[in-house]
Image (cartoon, grey):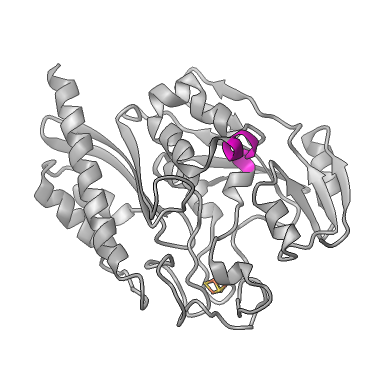
Amino acid sequence: MTPFTFARAGDVSEAVRLGAHARSKYLGGGTNLVDLMRETIERPDALVDVTGLSSTIEEHDDGSLLIGAAARNTAVAEHRAVRVRFPVLSRAIVAGASAQIRNMATVGGNLLQRTRCTYFYDDEGSRCNKRTPGQGCDAVDGFNRIHAILGASSSCVATHPSDLCVALAALGAVVHLQGAGGARTLLLTDLYRLPEDHPGHETMLQPGELITAVELPALSFGADSVYRKVRDRSSYAFALISVAAAIELDGDTVKDVRLALGGVAHKPWRAWKAESALKGQPASAKNFHAAAAAELADAKPLRDNGFKIDLAQRTIVAVLNGLAEQASKGASA
Ligand code: SF4
């Protein structure tokens, strides 16, 4: 591990001041960053511990929630308002990691965790444009079963590993940021970049900018939401495909729907095309199939991951069928 200095920030302005140093990193639970430092893939010369900053979960009168970036994943998953109003988020967090990791990991850190592409971690023997710009990407022609089918480039085909972020994408979460130039907000789906020619540039964060909170806007049908994760084994594995969804019916018609996918792209993938295809249409299996096909129409499989296209469509349809059934039972109860 490369030597580094360590400082614990007492408040946001101190954190931003300490984080202005060019090669500093903010430290949350450390469940990804410390691994990357041990492997010398991340080599910060200063760590700013931000775990003492806001970890509260504020419930607002309009039904929205404001989650401090230092909130531990477990605290969010177990919070009553989250479980009742946004169960998709609780389920995504529980599906995301072991209890020990959930107890350590923070919301801010989860948003900034890095891909689990195996070539990215193989510092000694593999080429990786994300780790070393211009080096090449051994995943493109390598073993790429877990890699992206949407939004990838010839420079990088990695996927974003977070489950929590897929739920946040579906819920229209807003990320609160603080930098030397002031505070701003971004839609979570706008926080991330697709790889294009610069896969090392993963987010829209300015140098030294700190995630201070994540806001969940009120969602009247958030209680009818679900997260389904398809993976190679039932625990401690990253998603091959995941689906976060919520639906609102008006009789048999889809009044509103939220849909996001994990395991398919360099960022949590909001399924805008599928959502738009479904709104105002009958909530039928046929329409769910058509919407899933529309979303995956631009998918570009690699040598080993063509199965993801069919798997994603089937998972979307299964999740929407289940939600529609649940919503219509609720309406007739
Ligand atoms: Fe690196 Fe991206 Fe290629 Fe993986 S897919 S080796 S992270 S450039």
Answer above or below: position of 87 versus 287.
above
Taking the spot 72% from the left edge, 50% from the top edge, the residue there is 209
Answer above or below: position of 52 versus 301.
above
- Residue 249 in the image: x percent, y percent? 19, 32
Q: Is residue 287 left or right of residue 185?
A: left
- Which corner quadrant holds the N terminus? bottom right
* Residue 212 figure quarter: top right
- Residue 54 in the image: x percent, y percent? 69, 29
- Residue 194 in the image: x percent, y percent? 50, 65
Q: Is residue 93 visible?
A: yes
Taking the spot 18% from the left edge, 41% from the top edge, the residue there is 321
- Residue 225 in the image: x percent, y percent? 32, 34
Q: How many marks?
A: 0
Q: Nearer the viewer, residue 147 or 272?
A: 147
Residue interval drawn in magenta: 100-108
- Which corner quadrant holds the C terminus? top left
Q: Is residue 283 left or right of residue 225?
A: left
Q: Nearer the viewer, residue 210 or 264?
A: 264
**Residue 210 belongs to the span the image colors magenta:** no
Q: Is residue 282 left or right of residue 237?
A: left
Q: Is residue 328 left or right of residue 29?
A: left
Taking the spot 20% from the left edge, 29% from the top edge, the residue there is 326
Ligand 1 picture quarter: bottom right
